[in-house]
Image (cartoon, rainbow, N blue to C red):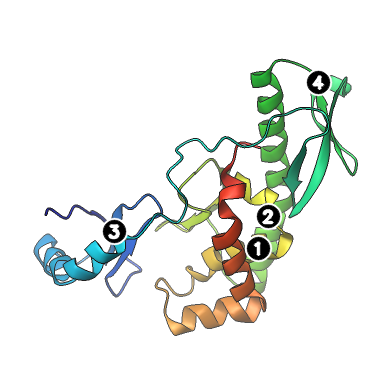
């Protein structure tokens, strides 16, 4: 059986690591000096382990577009880890208003969902990005660029150019979980691999890191739903 994988090289990386993503793709993170032949030898040596991982049931059952909830009065939606009721009504400037409940502009199904999606994205920028800046200052790391993105496969990422990308869907999670993802990505600016030193950094800044990690594993699919 053929084993396909994607290689991502980084000047900051000293060791080669192999990950199996949520979509079952295999990604090899390697130092810039690692040759294709050397990388392939390592991957082939891990074939048995990789095929075992690939045969596991997916973390989230395969639904490329999670259905989510209908945007109707009386239904509820997640925000910062809590469920709040939705009411369709007239709102200022046709946008979503939050006041211990969601007040959503009336419209067709696509319009109401898009209004909600836009509101979530704006809240993510206003709440998550300042917390990222605060934790970066506390850890003494410099982020070249921070952005909220639409990514169904990762909660966050740290690029080789010190750019941090965070999934807008995190705004639905509890603040402790948001902080865990933020610190997890920032810690990569200090320690590229998931070494004991890396996890010590994360746990030192987020004492409940293990609980937040478990929360994402248990409830991540709820965040990925449209609403």
Q: Are marks 2 and 1 in contact (CB under 8 Å)?
A: yes
Marks 3/4: CA–CA distance: 47 Å
Separation of residues labelled 4 and 2 (CA atoms): 25 Å
Residue tagged 3: 55
Please provide percent x and percent y for residue 84.
82, 44
Sequence order check: which comes first, mark 3 or mark 4? 3
The front one of 90 and 84 is 84
Sequence-first disc among 3 and 1 = 3
Q: Quadrant of residue 207?
A: bottom right
| Residue 129 placement (x, y as % from top left) | 67, 52
| Disc 2 target residue | 173
Q: Residue at x 73, y 60 (%)?
A: 175
Crowding around mark 2 (Cα neighbors within 10 Å: few <14, some 14 to 19, many 20+) is: many
Instruction: Kindly state the secondary structure of the residue where label 1 is placed.
Output: helix
**Element assignment for label 3:** helix
Q: Which residue is mark 1?
A: 177
- Front in this rendered view, residue 130 or 103: 103
For residue 200, above or below residue 67: below
Say which mark, if any, is on residue 94.
4
Q: CA distance from mark 3 to mark 1?
A: 28 Å
Instruction: Give the structural element (helix, strand or loop) at label 2.
Output: loop
Q: Which tag, 4 or 2, sits closer to the chain's start?
A: 4
Q: Position of residue 223 (x, y in %)?
A: 61, 48
- Real-space Cα distance between discs 1 and 4? 31 Å
In the image, 156 versus 218, the foreground residue is 218
Q: Earlier in the sequence, mark 2 or mark 3?
A: 3
Residue 177 shows up from this direction? yes
**Between tags 2 and 3, which lies in front?**
3
**Dot 1 crowding, Cα within 10 Å, few <14, some 14–19, many 20+:** many
Q: Is residue 10 visible?
A: no
Residue lying furthest left: 37
């Amino acid at each position: 059986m053929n084993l396909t994988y994607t290689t991502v090289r980084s000047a900051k990386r000293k060791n080669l690591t192999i990950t199996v993503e949520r979509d079952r793709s295999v990604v090899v993170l390697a130092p810039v000096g690692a040759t294709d032949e050397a990388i392939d030898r390592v991957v082939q040596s891990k074939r048995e382990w990789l095929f075992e991982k690939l045969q596991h049931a997916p973390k989230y059952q395969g639904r490329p577009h999670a259905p989510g909830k209908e945007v109707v009065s009386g239904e509820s939606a997640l925000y910062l880890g809590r469920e709040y009721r939705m009411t369709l009504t007239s709102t200022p400037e046709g946008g979503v208003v939050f006041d211990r409940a969601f007040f959503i502009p009336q419209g067709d199904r696509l319009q109401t969902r898009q209004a909600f999606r836009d509101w979530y994205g704006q809240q993510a920028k206003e709440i998550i990005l300042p917390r990222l800046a605060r934790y970066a200052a506390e850890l003494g790391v410099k982020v070249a660029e921070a952005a909220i993105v639409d990514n169904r496969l990762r909660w966050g990422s740290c690029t080789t150019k010190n750019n941090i990308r965070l999934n807008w869907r995190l705004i639905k999670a509890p603040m402790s979980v948001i902080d865990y993802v933020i610190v997890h990505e920032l810690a990569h600016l200090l320690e590229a691999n998931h070494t004991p030193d890396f996890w010590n950094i994360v746990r030192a800044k987020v004492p409940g890191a293990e609980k937040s990690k478990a929360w994402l594993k248990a409830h991540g699919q709820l965040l990925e739903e449209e609403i």
